[in-house]
Image (spheres, coloured by chain):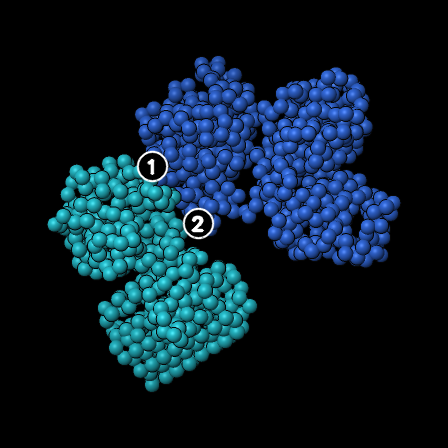
Amino acid sequence: MKCVILAAGEGKRVHPLTFTRPKVMIPIGNKPILEWNLLNAIDAGIREFVFVVSYKSEMVRSYFGNGEKWNVKIEYVNQGEPLGTAHAISVVEKFVKDFIVLCGDTIFGKKDFKNIVKTKNSMGLAKVENAKEYGIIELDKENVVKIYEKMDEPFTNIINGGIYHFNSKIFNYIRKTKKSPRGEFEITDSINMMIKDTNLKGIFLKNWRDVVYPWHLLDANEEILKKIDKKIDGTVEKNTTIKGKVIIGKNSTIMNGSYIEGPVVIGENCKIGPNCYIRPYTSIGNDCHVGNACEVKNSIILNNSNVPHQNYVGDSIIGENCNLGAGSKVANLRLDKKNISVVLNGNKLNTNRRKLGVIMGDNVQTGINSMMNVGTIIGNNCFLGLGAIAKDEIKPYAMIL
Amino acid sequence: MCGIIGYTGFRDANKVLIDSLKRLEYRGYDSAGISVIHKKQQVYKQVGEIKALEKNLPDFKGTVGVGHTRWATHGGVTKENAHPHLSSNKKIAVVHNGIIENFSKLRENLIKKGYKFASQTDSEVIAHLIEDNYKDNLEKAVYSALKKVEGYYAIVVTSTDEPDKIVGARKDSPLVIGVGDNENFLGSDITAFLKYTKRVVFLNDGELCAVTNKDIKIFDENNKAVKRDEQVIKWDYKDAEKSGFSHFMLKEIFDQPDTVHHVIRGRVSEIDRAIQFNENVENLLSNGLDSIHIVACGTSYYAGLVGKYMLEKLTGIPVIVELASEYRYFGTRDENSLIIGVTQSGETLDTLAALKEAKNSGCRILVITNVIGSTATRLSDGYILTQSGPEIGVAATKTFTSQILVLCLIALKIGMLKNKIGADEVYKYILQLKELPRKVRQALDQSDEILKIANQLKNTQSVFFIGRGINYPLSLEGALKLKEISYLHAEGFAAGELKHGPFALLTKITPVVAIVTKDFTYEKLLANIGEVKARGPKVIAIADENDTEIEKHADFVIRFPSNSDIMSCIPIIVILQLLAYHVANLRGCSIDKPRNLAKSVTVE
């Protein structure tokens, strides 16, 4: 059976990280979201994949190639233009018969893959606390009766999980699908038509994690790090403390005086320490440096970035190729302890988090003693001058002097 | 210029072709067509823009096809002349961008063999020629057919005998392979298929390729297989129409090595040492001319002024250059005078009115334009196309250099007909013409240095441009470009005229751009620069690359590649265009659509 993974979207709601990469290529626990899905699907026995790509497709292709590295076959189909999920699925018509298809930016567990593969004509359902942001599912026993668009006051907390098991009949319904009010061809409209002729079984997902906004990556990171096992391939110098589950990649060195509390993942070729404090739920990519008198907590640091001298980074995401100047620090808690709001793409949003630091795009450099307020969003390729204060949303290529 | 596209893959070719043609529409839009293979060649063509084609597009099945958007050069704008063209057996479809120079000979031979022609285009011969050479393999047939063709081309060919294959070939016209997954593309440029893939393989001149949805084979001009790696394009399809340039104007400035080549190609023969035009034009030029009037507006008028120097130097005939809006009411009309109307669009109302007036008085009319079938071509006794392709930036760039070159070719032709210039001299000029595209490229290479110098101009109020001889109209054009797009006050002066008035306006904060060529007025011009410097302003010299003196006199120097006394004006213009562009860009102006200006002025 083929597994179609929709990986074409830009993910505007995950700016600034998606200015420079497609959403599915955002790493969590040092692996792109798409790779987690690939690995889980492989564990469920799937060997043939079709990736539907478009936005910065060359990044997906150069990372995954033809799948050789995973011993599977990966084919690519370019969606061409972003016209919605039904359109994205329609482009694979000539390549599939009985198939499963999933949104590549949501992470599904191994068991979930297995259950969906087992059950023909099915779709994954999830239960969430607040269903406002999702498609709402009406069930009749175990069959899906209707999928509703986002509702202000949802009548249930059962939502569309974004994974389906279809056969080629779905393409007949896709062809009949009309543009939705928001101007896209939605697969949920096609499914609603199909349900009238065929039963579609709802399957509750056990491990389901979607990422809508960048701060959700911190939650996903936490969840993935909870499951890791200790594995130390790098060099650990004397007088260091490593507690709990910690992964340290090849050629990485943990220097004297470092204190690491797992779960923590550190990639390859990193220089950690001396004298630094890395706290739980932190993922550090490859070729990174965390230097003297730095503290990193519950954060994601992507490849080739440095937190080198006297820095504090908490509840934050630091993009690739970033460098913090000496003494650059991040605030992650309001003094009044209220929930933190951010401005993303010009819209003010409540993150429902009490703690959130900075979300920094790729190639950002900060000057010495610059400060970043809670919930600051910094676009790619920005400069913060020495002693500069960054807050709210900063557009890519901006210079704050 | 035309746009061509070929597709082989899994999507409905119909949609892909239309989509791609829309991206290529900047290359031409007088008619368009597609052909999709499903058992047979299903052809659909329309006169007009791609929209007209899309409107009633039949629901063709099939996933392999070719498409074309036309900018007519041979044959009028009709449905028959629109591409794709089919072979006589209706199996082979061809789209072509370029010109087949020996097409009438080929056509005669093919007609003798019984092939039936459906259009007046040069392109159609390729379709029949491929059929004539077809045995069992399309790329072999295309290779043999193209061996017989003289001219320049980019083509894409399909055949119902090999229904999953598209074959492409190029010589002096562009063609790029787009590498997809289970699909591949051929297009005049990357923008055609950028929506579907960013991976490309560039074809070199003289190469041929055979492409299916799974593989790509490339052959060199000796039909030997070539291996070439794909490249990944960095820009997105959003900035695609401008081919990655930030403005159409900049793209069009950078088009000039090609557009210059297009003017020369087919008209200048190095072997025969001759300049050739079509019959109507040659008749106009060979009849006893007493004088020449050039009638034009705006930038075309300045092209006329440059042309005046060339014509008078090479033919000895007095030339009067008139603004069309003035000539229309006040010009003299002499039956023995040739009127040359210069208009990019062929629709400039002032120029048309002036030409009509002249025609009514019995004058003969020659038109230089970029648009075949335009009103100007219809009321002329003969016309010469600049073949620059559509120009979208309102400020004329590539069409200006092409107009000047056409005037230069006219001057050479008349000079030869009147025996004013000897064969050796003609040959010297022909070699210089052939060199020009390379010289233009050299000028373009300096864009970054010109940007640095543009910084000197961006905050001034007023700029002077000075030059002598042919460089005087260049100064006028340099000033016009700056005015148009950067909204700075700028004026061009004959260098010797400064002391007769303009000096009164010259202050320390008025930069002066001096065009300095090493002719017999070189010393005079250095003296003029001295006069300017004495009053304090900064001087930016545009000087010959071999000029070793100029640094002593000017504050900033931009070098142009030396070529000859006449032809050097082309690289100099390119430098002036880049200077104006960079100043306007630094000032944050709306470069492609300057305030209050329109591309084609069809009102009085």
Colour displayed for chain B in the image of the structure: blue
Q: Position of residue A392 (x, y in %)?
A: 45, 64
Q: Is residue B485 above or below residue B120?
A: below
Q: Nearer the viewer, mark 2 or mark 1?
A: 1
- Secondary structure under badge 2? strand
Q: Would residue A225 be visible to someone looking at this image?
A: yes
Residue visible at 63% across and 53% down in the picture: B586
Q: Is residue B444 above or below residue B340?
A: below
Q: Is residue B129 left or right of residue B165?
A: right
Q: How many marks?
A: 2
Q: Position of residue A47 (x, y in %)?
A: 22, 52
Residue at the limit of the structure toward the left, as seen here = A141
Colour displayed for chain A in the image of the structure: cyan
Residue visible at 53% across and 23% down in the picture: B77
Q: Is residue B285 left or right of residue A226?
A: right
In the picture of the structure, the residue carrying the numbered disc 2 is B232
In the picture of the structure, the residue carrying the numbered disc 1 is B11
Which of the 4 quarters of the picture holds residue B491? top right
Q: Position of residue B108 (x, y in %)?
A: 52, 16
- Secondary structure under badge 1? loop
Tag 2: residue type? Val
Tag 1: residue type? Arg
Task: Say few, some or many: other residues with alpha carbon within 10 Å of mark 2 (under 14 / 14 to 19 / 20 or more).
Answer: few
Residue visible at 66% across and 37% down in the picture: B401
- Of all chains, the one bearing label 1 is B
